Image (cartoon, grey):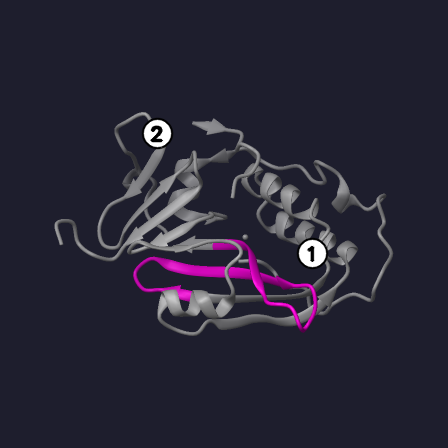
């Protein structure tokens, strides 16, 4: 069933080849529009089976990974250093808005439309980086980081979770009032649509 994702729904990204020169804020730019490009409503079951999610938080064996955490903190929670996808690059708020539009073009659905809409409203500028971790048996977690200057701490502002694909009929809705999707096997993965929380358990049931 297709539903529009609620605002606040907490992106692989094609990384920009290089940072653009500093530019003044251009409100006429397509990126500042509420609906800059056509997007499709999310089919949650299909997204959970074979698409990139933008969850927040993600819990792995009870350890919560949330926006606002530093890269080193996530390293420690996941037990290893990330691979660099994009090194630190300066961007103005205009350039960051255009960057987020590139993300949306690669994931043109309502999930990313609302999430990126929230982010561009923050008018972030400074230094930006992207890094990712392999989650054995589950997929890949990519985090996008920001810091206002070299002297400031880095903080994750967005996650992309790309799970290993499964057949659509393997995705089931858990019984109960909450809208929670599950994928069988180990690791066991659940996605609570209402809270946008993805939970991953690498332990077999009963352990």
Q: Is residue 196 left or right of residue 37?
A: left
Could you say where residue 140 lies in the image, as x and y percent from the top left?
42, 61
Of the pair 76 and 84, the residue shown nearer to us = 76
Q: Is residue 9 left or right of residue 191?
A: right
Q: Earlier in the sequence, mark 1 or mark 2?
A: 1
Location of the C terminus (image quadrant): bottom left
Looking at the image, is mark 1 or mark 2 nearer the viewer? 2
Which residues are drawn in magenta?
Answer: 133-160
Of the pair 84 and 155, the residue shown nearer to us = 155
Could you say where residue 118 lies in the image, as x and y percent from the top left?
64, 42
The quarter of the displayed image where residue 173 is located? top left
The residue labelled by disc 1 is 99
Q: Identify which residue is drawn at 69% across, 40% down.
A: 37
Q: Identify which residue is drawn at 30% across, 60% down.
A: 137
Q: Identify which residue is drawn at 28% across, 41% down.
A: 170
Could you say where residue 60 lies in the image, as x and y percent from the top left?
33, 56
Taking 187 as reference, is 45 above or below it? above
Question: Was residue 29 drawn as part of the magenta stretch in this picture?
Answer: no
The quarter of the displayed image where residue 78 is located? bottom left
Which numbered marker is on residue 178?
A: 2
The residues tagged by marks 1 and 2 sit, at their Cα atoms, a distance apart of: 34 Å
């Amino acid at each position: 069933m297709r539903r529009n994702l609620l605002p606040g729904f907490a992106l692989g990204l094609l990384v920009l080849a290089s940072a653009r020169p500093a530019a003044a804020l251009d409100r006429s730019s397509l990126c500042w529009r509420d609906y800059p490009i056509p997007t499709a409503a999310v089919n949650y079951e299909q997204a959970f089976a074979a698409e990139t999610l933008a969850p927040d938080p993600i819990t792995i064996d009870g350890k919560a990974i949330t926006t606002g955490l530093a890269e080193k903190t996530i390293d420690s929670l996941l037990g290893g250093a990330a691979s660099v996808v994009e090194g630190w690059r300066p961007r103005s708020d205009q350039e960051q808005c255009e960057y987020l539009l590139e993300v949306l073009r690669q994931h043109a659905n309502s999930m990313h439309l609302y999430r990126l809409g929230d982010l561009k409203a923050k008018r972030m500028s400074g230094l930006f980086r992207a890094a990712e971790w392999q989650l054995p048996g589950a997929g890949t977690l990519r985090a996008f980081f920001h810091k206002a200057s070299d002297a400031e701490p880095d903080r994750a502002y967005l996650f992309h979770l790309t799970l290993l694909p499964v057949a659509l009929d393997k995705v089931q809705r858990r019984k109960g009032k909450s809208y929670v999707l599950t994928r069988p096997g180990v690791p066991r993965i659940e996605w609570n649509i209402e809270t946008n929380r993805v939970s991953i358990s690498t332990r077999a049931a009963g352990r």
